[in-house]
Amino acid sequence: MKAIKKAVFTIVTISALLLASCGDSSGSDESVKTVPVKKSAAVYFSRVGNTEFADDIDAITSASLNRADGELKGNAQMIAQWAAEEADCKSFEIVTEKSYPADYDKTVDLAKDEKSAKERPSLKGSFDDLSDCDTIWLVFPNWWTDLPMPVYSFFDKYDLSGKNIYVFVTHEGSGFSSTIKTIKELEPKANVVQALSIRGGSVKDSEKNVKDYVKKQLEG
């Protein structure tokens, strides 16, 4: 009897996770009141740019790394660049002072430690042009059902009140999780919109989907 109950619980749990991950792939909240998109910027956090990878790193076996025209690119980086191309705007990368490990599992562990400690990693550079933008295309990976802590650092540094924040998340089954709720709490006066969540292994095939979404927002 215990074995049967355990099996039923496992099936129900898996089913719930599958429904959650499938249901939020494209879930813009139409109830969010946004301002017309006139000037925008794409802002992203990615492992590439925050990690010192070897030149011969195998991107094929990693769901978070890609080779595009011979260049190593991260999932969030590619989505942000597609959004910037469609919107004809600049893209900005959130870069930390410290580097993350090239080993994926070590990065996962470090991300968990940062979250537990509520650490806000120091960031390099500044995005002065954001003050003139009415819209931010924000892209990041879902780390431990949350924003990566460097994205928290970004929100600590910039007040995006009155701006549209279209959120794009890469994930491996957890979708947006609580990221939209968290961003609304961090930027209560911004217009936070759930845009697209894309599985890591599907990012390379998502250019049209991303650009179509951005085009729709540009057209109002």
Image (cartoon, rainbow, N blue to C red):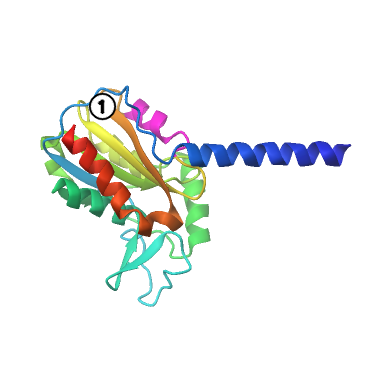
Give the camera-side residue of 91 and 217.
217
| Mark 1 Cα-neighbour bin, 10 Å: few <14, some 14–19, many ≥20 | many
Q: Residue 207, position in %: x, y?
A: 30, 54
- Report which residue position mark 1 lands on: 190
- Does the image show residue 123? no
What residue is shown at x 70% (from left), y 41% (from top)?
11
Main structural element of the magenta stretch: helix, strand or loop?
Answer: helix
Give the camera-side residue of 62 and 216.
216
The single residue placed furthest to the right in the displayed view is 1
Q: Residue 186, position in %: x, y?
A: 34, 29
What residue is shown at x 50% (from left), y 41% (from top)?
22
Q: Residue 127, position in %: x, y?
A: 17, 45
Q: Residue 159, position in %: x, y?
A: 22, 31
The magenta span reads: 176-186
- Quarter of the figure that contains the N terminus: top right
Residue 177 drawn in magenta? yes
Amino acid at dot 1: Ala
Give the camera-side residue of 88 and 48.
88
The relative height of residue 58 versus residue 220 in the rendered view (above or below) is below
